[in-house]
Image (tube, grey):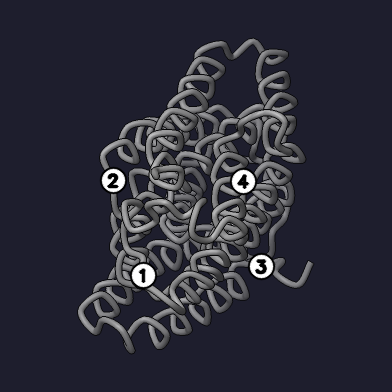
Amino acid sequence: MIINNFLSLILFLEIYSLSVFFALVKKSKDAAVRFILNSALMTSLIFMGASLYYAENKTLLFLPLNNVDSSLLITSIILITCGLFFKIGISPFHLWLVDLYKNAPIKLLFFIDSVWKFVLLFIFTDMLNSLNIIDYNIFKIIIVSVSYLSLIAGSICPIFKKDIKEFLAYNSIGHLGVALAAISVVAIKQALMYVCAYCIFSALFLFSLLLLKKKQTIEQFSDMSSLMKTKPIVGTFISVSLFSIAGLPPSIPFFIKIQLIQKIINSEDFLTVIMVVIFSFASIYYTSKHTRYLFKQ
């Protein structure tokens, strides 16, 4: 793994943040400034956490931790985790993400929503394995709490969002909540498979939007009215991608989610199972609500 220490992790995150800033500033200078300020704040948290980690372990490498009872190390883990959750865009560190999605061009969203989330979650899980902290109670509490908040945000907020980009932002938060629920029971493989499937169908949806925006303005779901009649191929791509993201059978995400829920059931974490199931039904509901425009005559 190229990123095997906190210094290279911070450098990687900042290269990404600067890239997004320069891409975003062309469309909205205000949104770009808000993004870079928030990003700098969270990077300072990661820096502080890495400093405490170095003070305890005399190294910045990702090495198995033996003394997680140390208050210095616990504080370090909390700061680094919160900083990474912000960078990924997980509730309650998600407000910047909604602002970014709303102001970003579709081409930038294509990268953020279909590439960046998987890459950063992969780095995060690899760090967990290297540090060997995933089984510690303090860390599980953080993961489960953030997972529940993300599932709640992903279940409720998209229902009231007519703007496509805002809908995508909150929907992605909910799916990351599902992935964190899997990570909390050490089902890391299923979590990465789930996010990978989400990213693939999200990319298909955004690609379809790019095809549409060449000929018409698409901002809200109502702008896609009668699309199945006027542009049936693009309309089919959009409906298939949205229902696959929602996890409707017989889509690939549906079968991955079944495996993921089975893993959580095996761990006897039934509250997490209930939260994931509620999000799944809510996702199907609001996806059906918004995609009805495609089939209007």
The type of residue carrying mark 1 is Ser
> Label 1's element?
helix
**What residue sits right under mark 3 in the picture?**
5
User: What separation in Å lies between label 3 and label 2 (alpha carbons)?
Assistant: 39 Å
**What residue sits right under mark 4 in the picture?**
240
Judging depth in this view, the residue of 296 and 207 nearest the camera is 296
N-terminal of the two: label 3 or label 2? 3
Q: Is residue 91 visible?
A: yes
x and y, in percent, of residue 165 in the image: 37, 59
> Label 4's element?
helix
Residue at 26% x, 81% y is: 28
**What residue sits right under mark 2 in the picture?**
161
Q: Is residue 179 above or below residue 285?
A: below
The type of residue carrying mark 3 is Asn
Q: What number is the disc on residue 39?
A: 1
Judging depth in this view, the residue of 210 and 85 nearest the camera is 210
Disc 2 crowd rating (10 Å Cα; few below 14, some 14-19, many 20+) is some
Disc 3 crowd rating (10 Å Cα; few below 14, some 14-19, many 20+) is some
> Label 3's element?
loop
N-terminal of the two: label 1 or label 3? 3
N-terminal of the two: label 1 or label 4? 1
Residue at 51% x, 51% y is: 228
The type of residue carrying mark 2 is Lys
